[in-house]
Amino acid sequence: MRNYEAVLIFKSGSELLAGGREFVKGLFNDNGCKVVNEEEVGERNLAYEIKKNNKGFYIAYQLECAPETIQVLDKALKLRGEILKYLFVRK
């Protein structure tokens, strides 16, 4: 198990945000990731437009998971419309 930090940018809007957060929590649990910490950074203006959005809601996660799991998470997050961008960094 390795430590990772993940930052996800969700589309602004309460319905999209709530659905996206539940999906991400379920995805982490289903793939054996342990969420050590979850921090809401809040809604911010984006430096450039992403998928026709000027604002995004940032959430930072600290995870413990196997290295192979990151590839699975990457494939699943690409398909979600409410997630604008994401980044996984090994700590």
Image (cartoon, rainbow, N blue to C red):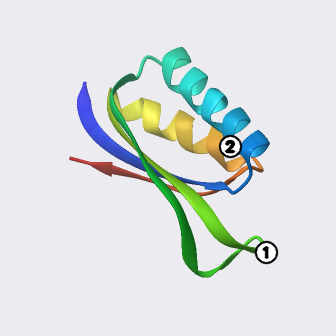
Q: Quadrant of the N terminus?
A: top left
In-front residue for pair 91/43: 43
Q: Residue at x 76, y 44 (%)?
A: 16
Query: Which residue occupies 24% across, 32% down?
Result: 2
* Residue 53: percent from left, percent from top: 73, 71
Quick check: 14 left or right of 46?
Answer: right
Q: Which disc is residue 11 wearing?
A: none
The local secondary structure at tag 1 comes to loop
Q: Mark 1 or mark 2, which has the lower sequence index?
A: 2
Given the image, on which type of amino acid does mark 1 rest? Lys
The residue depicted at 58 percent of the width and 25 percent of the height is: 27
User: Which label was assigned to residue 17?
Assistant: 2
Q: According to the image, label 1 marks what residue?
A: 52
Tell me how far mark 1 sits from mark 2, CA to CA: 17 Å
56 relative to 75, above or below: below
As drawn, the residue found furthest toward the left would be 91
* Looking at the image, residue 29 lies above or below residue 27: above
Q: Nearer the viewer, residue 32 or 25?
A: 25
> Percent from the top left, x then y, of residue 78?
67, 49
Residue type, numbered disc 2? Leu
Q: Looking at this view, is 70 or 51 the one in front?
A: 51
Q: What crowding class fits label 1: few (fewer than 14 Cα within 10 Å), some (14-19), or many (20 or more)? A: few
